């Protein structure tokens, strides 16, 4: 986790600091509640998945300013020395509630809820959105790939084209969270305890004068390897693997061949027939090369004899949905509900809870209500930090979170598991109590502007 930890309070937008200074100058430092949510589902998604919470909590717990960073702020000429000294001693001491990582979520449902003096809650806004937004996109994309693979293994391959090194690590983590068996990224493996996979690239084959010699040499060093067979001609590459098996006899232990280009379905059928005819029924077929959930689903539907998929760029950048309308909004200050009325960006006031109901093991309805009201169903928001220190629910092991994510996908209604838009969206209601709170505040606000 240390490779993705953000420790500097400077990872914030300037206006968070200018507002913090203004709050302090006005003596405004009462408890506030901010909630992180997204406003609508992209047309390409039936659901989203919450991720990134563990990295967020670890970062919030570690936030501070070095002397050099403080000098930089001083050089901006916008902040008095008294305020800078307060920033120098900054330690988040508030409370955080969040849905567990891997939880299926829907529009307007709080994913993270921050309860703290308004200066503390305000200055971490940029960090909260950043550390949850992209991991949630990646986890949601990975969930679709895993569902499309229908039980076949998925390995995340996208580091080289991810949008930065931090993003590459978070994609690897989010993919593993949602059911991928591992990643090609070695640092992600070390940072998060994720299994790592990889054998050879085309350059290794090209560096040798003969493809068969390259196969023999590599298998001599790594007997249980996967051999990449499409550098020149895929059927020809498979034939050379078969020849190698005959040459090595009982010493042949190659586990798989990898297809990385061309008509993967047709080539997989041909390769399977060739391998089986040679008695190599145990040699698996691994496919990669520009795949996403739609290509994976098409190959599975066609019955392609592919045992595992490597999915890279389109997963690593969440190509079809590269951003989400995610917001971090003030909903309560000094014990009073607050709301925004901007066109198409209006919010519900007050601190909230999300209640989820199930029938026959599947989720059927969510209710967004006040945090202190009673509703049927499972409460999604859990306390994960108190007094600026992570609680047990805020220190969940990745393997434990992975089990939760698997259970969430199992409880997802069948229409939402489809890659196509569901004809009937998942039902999310607002409780009558919260509706009444909103109407009351609307009346109060209307009276105040007359």
Image (spheres, rainbow, N blue to C red):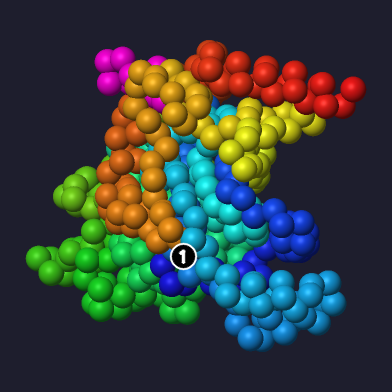
What residue is at 79 percent from the left and 75 percent from the top? 80
Residue 214 placed where, x, y %? 36, 75
Can residue 104 be found in the magenta stretch? Answer: no
What residue is at 41 percent from the left and 54 percent from the top? 386
- The residue range painted magenta reads 355-364
**Residue 270's image quarter?**
top left
Regarding mark 1 in the picture, which secondary structure is present there? helix
What residue is at 21 percent from the left and 70 percent from the top? 223
132 relative position to 264: left or right: right
**244 or 446: nearer the viewer:** 446
**289 or 75: nearer the viewer:** 75
Q: Is residue 341 visible?
A: yes
- In the displayed structure, 190 sits above or below 364; it is below
Q: Residues within 10 Å of mark 1 (few under 14, many from 20)?
A: some
Label 1 sits on residue:
61
Assign the C terminus to one quadrant of the image.
top right
Magenta: main secondary structure equals: strand
**Residue 217's image quarter?**
bottom left
Residue 283 placed where, x, y %? 23, 53
State the count of labels: 1
């Amino acid at each position: 986790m240390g490779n993705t930890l953000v420790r500097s309070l400077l990872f914030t937008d300037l206006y968070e600091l200018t507002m913090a200074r203004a709050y302090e100058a006005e003596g405004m430092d009462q408890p506030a509640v901010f909630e992180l949510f997204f406003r609508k589902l992209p047309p390409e998604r039936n659901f989203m998945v919450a991720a990134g919470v563990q990295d967020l909590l670890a970062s919030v717990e570690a936030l501070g300013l070095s002397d050099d960073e403080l000098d930089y702020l001083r050089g901006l000429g916008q902040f008095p020395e008294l305020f800078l000294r307060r920033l120098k001693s900054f330690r988040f001491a508030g409370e955080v509630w969040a849905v567990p990582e891997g939880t299926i979520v829907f529009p307007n449902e709080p994913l993270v809820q921050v309860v703290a003096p308004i200066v503390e809650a305000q200055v971490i806004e940029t960090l909260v959105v950043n550390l949850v937004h992209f991991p949630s996109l990646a986890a949601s994309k990975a969930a679709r790939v895993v569902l499309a693979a229908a039980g076949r293994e998925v390995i995340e391959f996208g580091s080289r084209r991810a949008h930065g090194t931090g993003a590459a690590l978070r994609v690897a983590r989010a993919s593993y969270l949602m059911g991928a068996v591992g990643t090609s990224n070695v640092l992600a493996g070390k940072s998060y305890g994720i299994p790592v996979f990889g054998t050879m690239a085309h350059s290794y084959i090209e560096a040798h004068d003969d493809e068969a010699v390259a196969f023999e040499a590599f298998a001599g060093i790594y007997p249980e390897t996967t051999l990449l067979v499409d550098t020149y001609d895929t059927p020809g590459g498979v034939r050379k693997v078969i020849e190698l098996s005959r040459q090595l006899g009982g010493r042949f232990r190659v586990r798989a061949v990898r297809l990385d280009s061309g008509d993967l379905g047709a080539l997989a059928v041909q390769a399977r027939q060739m391998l089986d005819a040679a008695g190599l029924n145990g040699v698996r077929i691994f496919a990669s090369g520009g795949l996403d959930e739609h290509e994976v689903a098409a190959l599975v539907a066609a019955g392609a004899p592919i045992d595992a998929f490597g999915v890279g760029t389109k997963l690593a950048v969440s190509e079809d949905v590269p951003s989400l309308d995610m917001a971090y909004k003030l909903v309560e200050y000094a014990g009073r509900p607050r709301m925004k009325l901007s066109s198409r960006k209006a919010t519900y006031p007050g601190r909230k809870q999300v209640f989820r109901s199930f029938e026959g093991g599947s989720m059927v309805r969510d209710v967004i209500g006040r945090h202190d009201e009673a509703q049927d169903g499972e409460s999604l928001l859990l306390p994960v930090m108190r007094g600026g220190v992570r609680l047990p629910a805020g220190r969940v092991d990745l393997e434990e979170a992975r089990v939760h994510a698997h259970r969430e996908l199992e409880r997802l209604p069948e229409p939402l598991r489809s890659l196509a838009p569901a004809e009937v969206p998942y039902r999310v209601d607002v409780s009558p109590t919260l509706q009444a709170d909103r109407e009351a505040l609307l009346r109060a606000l209307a009276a105040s502007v007359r």
